[in-house]
Amino acid sequence: MPVKIVESKPIPVAKVKEILSSLDRELNQFQRRTLEYSQLFSKLDGKAAEELVERLVKEFELEVGEAVQIVNCMPETIEELRVFFPRYKMVATEKLEAILKVLDEYRSKQG
């Protein structure tokens, strides 16, 4: 049965893992590989990842795509975090430190 695209939006890898794990049917080769990737690389559970994306968008006025990429990678230093912002978009160090603090909150929750 062909898949019908209902909506297209960036989501964290952790949410992909949650969605694919919950399907009641056999996964095709592409879906199985995607699930394997998501199991290896997701840093949070799906709910926490979505919550963190929302928080980054609201509190720091990030674009959803930026927030998703940050959550997927969970950078630990300011230098690692700067990679997610284009050169023309100067982000104050204080803002980056605040973002890292929020990421650390979620990292510690995952234990």
Image: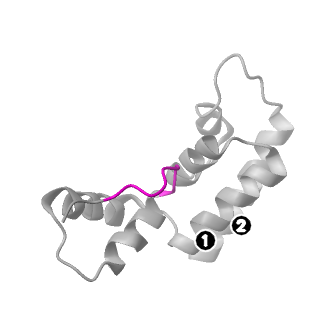
Q: Compared with residue 64, is residue 16 higher up or lower down, i.e. above or below? A: below
Label 1 element class: helix
Q: Nearer the viewer, mark 1 or mark 2?
A: 1
| Residue 80 on image: x %, y % | 59, 37
Dot 2 crowding, Cα within 10 Å, few <14, some 14–19, many 20+: few
Image-quadrant location for residue 23 = bottom left
Residue occupying image coordinates x 19% and y 55%: 30
Image quadrant in which the C terminus is located: bottom right
- Rendered view: 4 above or below 105: above
Q: Is 90 left, or right, of 109 in this rendering? A: right
| Residue 45 higher or lower than 73, as above or below | below
- Please identify the residue farthest to the bottom as the structure is shown: 24
In three-dimensional space, the C-alpha distance between marks 1 and 2, rounded to whole angstroms, equals 11 Å
Residue that appears at 68% across and 38% down: 78
Question: Which residue is under mark 2?
Answer: 105
Residue at x-position 18% and y-position 66%: 1
In the displayed image of the protein, which residue is found farthest to the top? 88
Is residue 58 found left or right of 105 in the rendered image? right
| In this view, 67 is above or below 3 | above
Q: Is residue 60 left or right of residue 111?
A: right
Q: Is 7 part of what is drawn in magenta?
A: yes
* Residue to which mark 1 is pinned: 48
Mark positioned earlier in the residue sequence (1 or 2): 1
Query: Residue 18 in the image: x percent, y percent?
Result: 42, 73
Type of secondary structure dominating the magenta stretch = loop
Amino acid type at circle 2 is: Glu
The numbered mark at residue 58 is: none
- Image quadrant assignment for residue 107: bottom right
